[in-house]
Image: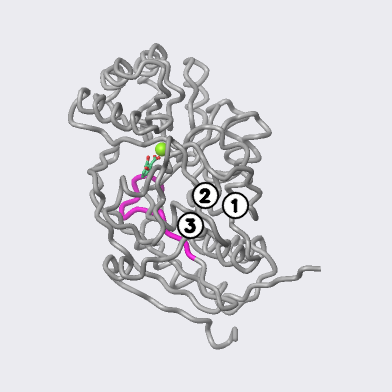
Amino acid sequence: MLCLTMRIEAAELHLLELPLKFRFETSFGVQTTRHIPLLTLFGEGLAGYAEGVMEQLPLYREETTSGAVAFLLDTALDQVLGHNFPNPQAMVDTLSPFRGNRMAKAMIEMAFWDLWAKHLNQPLWTVLGGVRERIPVGVSLGIQPSPQATADLAAKEAAKGYKRIKLKIKPGHDVETVRAIRAGLPGFPLTVDANSAYALSDIRVFKEFDALELDYIEQPLAYDDLLDHAALQARIQTSICLDESVQSAKQARKGLQLGAGRVLNIKVARVGGHLEARKVHDVAQAFGAPVWMGGMLEAGVGRAHNIHAATLPGYSKPGDTSSASRYWRRDIINEALEAQDGFMSVPKGPGIGVTLDTEAVKQYTLKRIYKTADVQHR
Ligand code: OSB
Ligand code: MG
């Protein structure tokens, strides 16, 4: 019988700053750079990688880059360094007493999965139970200066083969803009993402969207709310898609049971890693709810993880995992993650199947920290 264990010998954390190629405006502000903590776990002569998706300011969810780095270095990594795990679930169990901090814990979990799959000499998607070697993808467009500028950009991305356009909206930048896009792209899959910028009292806006044949409306109401989403869903035709209000399989079950939405955006890191993401996927399958893979403007390592996870059977809608070259002049990996005809191919090779461009990593690094097991654990 195959019997493997994985001892986590050491961890390296690079704090990266990458300039975005575009100005990304959402209902909570404008982003022009991404601060990305990049974690490497070492064990059994192998290296496993993961990126943190938390942002500098706690606008999307509560976690912040600086808070996550402190939690990892002062607390979480000490629980796993020098320890031997029989499988990824055992590693997750070690961190489960700590509440919240899902994105930070996901960094360790995802890097461990990369190590684990490499130890098995298998691509990650195979080990996770994926069923396809390429995934359908769309793009997420930030708020643009005018409805016409938005429509032009949407048409450009659709012409590249992307399978759906998602538009960031906020009060005052919503129905008119979507109407402009729809005029140029009749019948094309369009969605909007409000990132919680509306209240139930804005129902008029959502009723107007009903005439524009959106595939779904993503996270219209508060990040921590399910009841109001259920009330809104009962009053409009367009499906609601939950993003930031689902952090676990339990919350997914409650959301779908309440009728707070009919579609789920799954972000591996938002829910704490691959194991929980798979549970969220399974809950959605049980409810017959389609899911799709979200994104947090990841560089190559995070993007590769998301692509592997999106090979599970329930990911039936195009996700946000578009070409890395849309975001970065130079990625942090050697492989090009580029979509073709609206499909992203899963990277080949063991684990996440991508390798670090060490020159690029060096160029983007603000700070590097190396950590080994405390003496008492050796
Ligand atoms: O709500 O999906 C979101 C980016 C940062 C924070 C939240 C979200 C997003 C995106 C970007 O929509 C998706 C991408 O990676 O292109
Ligand atoms: Mg979203």
**Span of residues in magenta:** 49-61
What amino acid is at disc 2?
Val
What amino acid is at disc 3?
Asn
**Label 3 – label 1 distance at C-alpha:** 25 Å
**Label 3 – label 2 distance at C-alpha:** 28 Å
Residue on which disc 3 sits: 101
Instruction: Say few, some or many: other residues with alpha carbon within 10 Å of mark 1 (under 14 / 14 to 19 / 20 or more).
Output: many
**Label 2 – label 1 distance at C-alpha:** 8 Å
Relative side of 307 to 86, left or right:
left
Pair 2/1: label in front: 2
Residue 53 falls inside the magenta stretch? yes
Placement of the C terminus among the 4 image quadrants: bottom right
Q: Residue at x 47, y 74 (%)?
A: 11
Reading the chain from its start, which is encountered first: label 2 or label 1? Answer: 1
What mark, if any, has residue 125 been given in the picture?
1
Residue 310 falls inside the magenta stretch? no
Instruction: Give x and y (percent) for residue 116.
Output: 61, 65
Instruction: Say few, some or many: other residues with alpha carbon within 10 Å of mark 3 (under 14 / 14 to 19 / 20 or more).
Output: many
Residue on which disc 2 sits: 346
> Is the magenta region chiefly helix, strand or loop?
loop
Q: Is mark 3 within 8 Å of ligand 1?
A: no
Relative side of 286 to 195, left or right:
right
Badge 3 vs badge 1, beta-carbon distance below 8 Å? no
Say if 44 sits above or below 351 in the image: below
Badge 2 vs badge 1, beta-carbon distance below 8 Å? yes
Instruction: Give x and y (percent) for residue 375.
Output: 54, 88
What amino acid is at disc 1?
Trp
